Image: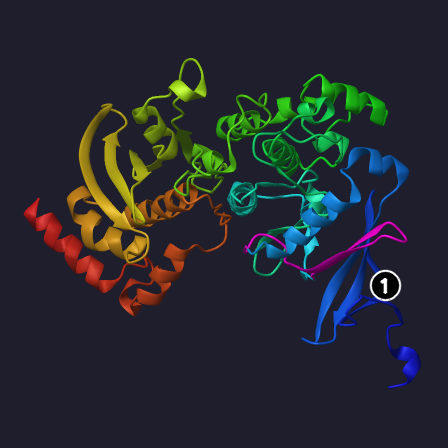
Amino acid sequence: MSSSSYLRIVERDPTGRYVRYTEKLGVGSWKIVYKGFDQVNGIEIAWSRIVITRRMSKCLKDIDNLCEEVCLLKCLEHENIVKCYHSWIDYRTKTIHMITELFTSTNLGHLIDKHKIVGNTAIKNWCIQILKGLAYLHSCNPPVIHRDLKSLNIFINGNSGVVKIGDLGLAVLLKPGSGVSGSVGTPEYMAPEIFRGNYNELVDIHSFGICVLEMVTREPNLYAECRRMEEIVEKVKAGIKPISLSRVTHPLIKNFIERCLAPAYMRPSANDLLNDPFLAPTTAGTSTIRTNLTLSLTQIHIQSEGSPFSITRNQVDRLLNPDLVMETYCDNKKLKLQGRIKDNGIIKMAFSITNDEQLKQVRNFEFEFSVETDKPYEYVVENIAIPLMLSTQGVKVATEIMIQLIAELQGETVTNTSKSSPSDEFFDAHQSPSHQNNKMPSCFAKMMASARRKF
C-alpha cells in the first residue's frame, strides 16, 4: 500500500493519543464532525469541533463553566448515550473539541426518510431507547440537559436496532435551585420556554415529542405551513403545535405526542413516558388484513371522558389488551374467532359457529393459545375440530383466521393471499395418497369419524 492511500492527519489532541483526519462525518449549525483514530486502543473515533462564535458566546455561559460541563460529559456511561472519551477547549482558537464513540449507524432522520414504511413496533422500540437515554441524563447529579435533541442527533444501528443519543456539544448542567438560560438548539425542535429562559430538563421531552411526530408522519419539514425560519420561531414561542400533528389518527400515539408537547408544568418526565399506554409491549397492531377469505376485522377501542389522567384502570386494560374479532363463512355457516392477548404470550380465544339462516349460535369453544409452544393447525386438529364438528375445509379456514388473528395481535401483517399459507404447507406435508383430493391427514380423518359416531 502506497503512503498516498493513508488518511491524512491534520490535527492531534494535546495528549497525542487521538488524531483527526480530513474526512467529514457530518456538519451541523454549530459544529463539524470528522473521522479520527484512537492510536492506543486502535479504534476509529468521531472528532467534533465546535467553534464558539460571538453569537454563540452570548447564549452560553462563560468559557470556564463551559469547560466544566464538557468535561462532565466524559463521565456519562449508558447504553443509549454515545460515549464521550475525551474533551478539551482550545482557548486560543475558542474551539471546543470532543472525542466520541464512532457509532457505525445512520441517524434517525435519514433512516425514516429512506424507509417510508415504518411500523408502530419499530417506533415504540426507538422511543423506549431514547427515553431510557434521556431518563439517564436527567437523573444525573446535577441533571444533564441535552438542549439539541433532534432526529439528526439520534443514531440507530441498522443491523441491531440499538439507538443512541449523540451530539451533546450543547448539553448543560441544571444546577440545584436554578433554571437554565440560553436560546440554543434547532428552532422546530425547541420548547417554547427556551426562548423565555429559566427552563429545565423537560425541554428535552418537548424535543423528543417532535421527533416522535417526525417518526409517525415521516415528514422532514414538520412546519411545512411556514415559509421562513422566523415564522417557525414565532409559532414555537407562542406554543403553537405543527399542523402535521392533526394528521396523526392513532389515538394512543396522538395522546403520547401531545403529552410531550404540553406546557412545561404539565409535561411528563422521561420515566413517566416509559409507562405510557402507547409503549406497552402488549398493545395490538392496527393494520388491516386482506386475504382471499374476505375477512371482516373489528377492533374495540375504549375512549375515556375528560383528561388522560382520569382514565380508569379497566379502560387502560382494554386499551392495552383489545379484543380482535374475525368472521368468515364456511360450509354455509359463519365462523367467528375472537381473541385477546394475556400475559406471557398467551392468547385467550373463542371460536363459534353460527347458522346464518337461523341466526343462532350452534357451537362454541373457548381456549388459551400459547404463541411460543402451540401451532395453529395442530391445535385446531387436536382440540377444536371435534367439539365444533369442522369439515376438512372448516379446519383449513379456522387455521387460516387463527394465524391472521395471532399476527394482528402481535402487530404483524399477513401478506398471504392467493399463495399457499402455513396451513397449506402443513396439509401438504401430512396428506396420504388416499387423501390427495381433499388433502385430509389420515389421523384427522380417524378423529372426525370418531366424532361423527359420538355426535
Residue located farthest toward the bottom when viewing the structure as drawn: 1
Q: Is residue 270 visible?
A: yes
- Residue 423's quadrant in the figure? bottom left
Query: Disc 1 marks which amino acid?
Result: Glu
Foreground: 79 or 177? 177
Viewer-nearest residue: 374 or 259: 259
Residue 240 lies in what quarter of the image? top right
Looking at the image, the residue that sits furthest to the right is 4
Residue in the picture at 82% in, 21% down: 231
Rendering coords of residue 234 (x, y %): 78, 19
Q: Nearer the viewer, residue 391 or 274?
A: 274
Residue 55: percent from left, percent from top: 87, 35
Residue 98 horizontal/vertical position (percent): 75, 56
Residue 267 locus on image (x, y percent)? 54, 26
Q: Residue at x 78, y 60 (%)?
A: 47
The residue to which callout 1 is attached is: 23
Q: Which residues are magenta?
A: 78-101
Classify 17 as above or below 59: below
Residue 99 visible? The answer is no
Up-down relation of residue 214 to residue 395 (above or below): above
In the image, residue 117 sits, relative to residue 334, either above or below, namely below
Q: Circle 1 — which element? A: strand
In the image as oriented, which residue stretches furthest toward the left? 454
Give the left or right position of residue 135, taking residue 6 as reference.
left
Apparent side of residue 269 relative to residue 422 in the rendered image (left or right): right
Q: Is residue 292 highlighted in magenta?
A: no
Q: Which quarter shows the C terminus?
A: top left
